[in-house]
Amino acid sequence: MDSINLILKKVKKVLVDAYISVFHFFCKNFQTLNRRLFKGFSTDQTNLDKKLVYSLSKSRIPNLRQLKYLKKYLTPKELWIIRVCVFVILISLSTVGVRFYFTHLQVVPIAGGKYIEGLIGSPKLINPLYSNIRDTDGDIGQLVYSSIFKRGVNSELVKDLIADYSVSQDGTIYAFTLRKDVLWHDDVPLTSEDIVFTFNAIKNTEYRSPLKNTFAGVEIQKTNDYKFQFILTDPYAAFLELLTFGILPQHIWSQIPAESAERAELNLKPIGSGPFKFNNFVKDKIGNILEYSLIANNAYYSNVPFINVNFKFFINFEEAINALNNGLIDGISYLPRDLKNNLITPKTINYHKLLLPQLTAIFLNKDNNDALKEKGVRQALALAIDKNFIVNKLIDGDANIVDGPILSNSFAYNSDIKKYNYNTEEANKLLDGAGWENIEITEEEIAELKEKLEESKETEKEKIQKKLDMGAGKWRLKNNKFLIINLKTVERQENKEIIESIKNFWEAVGVKVNSELLAVGSIQAEVIQPRNFDALFYGQIVGSDPDPYAFWHSSQAKQGGFNISNFTNKEVDKLLEDARLNADKNQRQENYKKFQEILAEEVPAIFIYSPIYIYPQNKSIKGFDVASILFPRDRFTNISNWYLKTGKKLIW
């Protein structure tokens, strides 16, 4: 564009010079030309002839037939000048046209086209009361229903159905004012009655909504048709984060008994107030939904979408990827990293890498292993792991390294905490300082021990067997006990590679590791709840608000709680309690920074990385601008801006 503007400036200068030359020529030669045209005529005669001509002509401007006689009165040189002038004028008009095109016509999205996405599973309950149970239900529900707040492109809270809100000084009353331009898909206005009905349905045990416990100690009150308020028993700084559930139309759902809600046809043919409306679905012979169609809601109170959306459902990701390869769909809800190479047309795909409020760490359980009660050992284990190798080599860069329980995109993140960068020398120093002697068991010694085992006394056999179990290598020993850690994780190919790498890192500093992979269905009951592990490589969803109370407060350090490491610290408890009750963002930030410093020093867990959500889409889809998500459905946050077709718009 800059080169075009430069050319236009040069052309403009040439044209200006040409105009000036032509003007000077006509000024200089006008009198001569006038005398030539009327040579031999007296002034009176000339005036009479002019009047005669004017009386016979309706216009004083010569027409094309008259212009052909002009050459009889002009010299060849003058004719040449006229032709040059005409050429210059034509070039000028062309230049002006080109410039106008580039400066006044803008390419803009226009309505039209259909986006087809592949989902794994099939929809059953497209209903805000239940849609967080299945991703397919949540994906469709995100497009059909509106909520009090929604997520922005960076996972931030954005006002959706509300125009304004306020919080009482003590943090227990949240008052809201609704927009007055919101219509349900059946053209009925959305009011406070709908908010109150939905919230009470969530809390009603007969509806069996999994959101019920989220709002314990919270009540709702209607102020008028467009105003309502939530009343909390105790202040909770992150309360607004909970208000992203979809709102149901009271005038429809109030006619359906609560105990029958899960069987209602409206769960598959929803009526909401969101950017898309239900159109139809296609079932196979046994009743499974194969395709689901949504159309743009032209009465939507915000930006009306440019496209319509279709979903196709698959049994697994392999089937969905095959459909994308064959052009049957335009995108997939998620691309597992280990299946990325299955895409045969990578150049036609945009791999949107979205940040997740999720972290993966090695949780250390000192109650299960006495060696882990020593802070020096825990710190040494952290220093012995090369996180860069794990992220860049094993995960192909599809993750971000983390150093603590609060992610770097949070306002509460503390960048100054103690970090454990890969340093085997320092790790060895810490283990030496903690009294863990580094002894070597050679292959020759192993062979000798095997021969002695049968001949030894029972008291000696136990010591010999311990050495045999360790195998050849350099190992850490203290008080006749070897430093051994049992490392467990969920059975996945990616996890298998990572814990094998962690095993190698730790054994390089003398720590024996026994690794174990467990089925995803048994990890909770057999490992996490009973705290049956020394070290657990595991992921946690931390949410968009930095409140880590559920993961690190001592009240959660029990069976069934989320404090997996059973970490207890009175100062941390006080910091977390005060932070979640305080609405002052600056004070919360200070509390969380101090909390991160304590955790970094104590190392109850070794934080490794935050995974990236890979969302593949055909490059024909434009306008995607999401950077981070809280749940998979949040990838649709700016779907109203997606488009397939463009047009020209005149701008003055």
Image: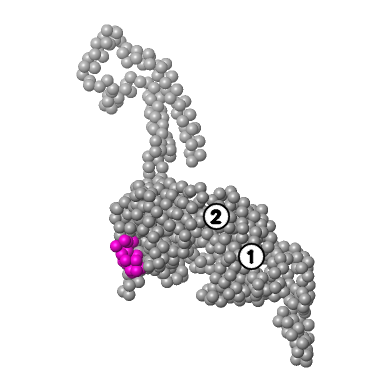
Q: Which amino acid does label 1 sit on?
A: Thr
Q: What residue is disc 2 on?
A: 581
| Disc 1 from disc 2: Cα separation | 20 Å
> Which label belongs to residue 401?
none
Hey, which quadrant is residue 471 in on the image?
bottom right
Image spot of residue 482 (x, y percent):
73, 76
**Vertical placement of 85 versus 621: above or below?**
above
Hey, which quadrant is residue 244 in on the image?
bottom left
Instruction: Name the quadrant of the C terminus.
Output: top left
Q: Which of 210 and 273 is in front in this view?
A: 210
> What residue is at 42 percent from the left and 52 percent from the top?
229
Q: Can residue 605 be seen in this view?
A: no
Q: Would you say 408 lies left or right of 97 here?
A: right
Q: Can residue 179 be seen in this view?
A: yes
Q: What residue is disc 1 on?
A: 568
| Numbered range of the magenta stretch | 253-270
> What residue is at 33 percent from the left and 19 percent from the top?
73
Q: Residue furthest left?
A: 56
Q: Which of 608 and 66 is in front in this view?
A: 608
Image spot of residue 571 (x, y percent):
65, 59
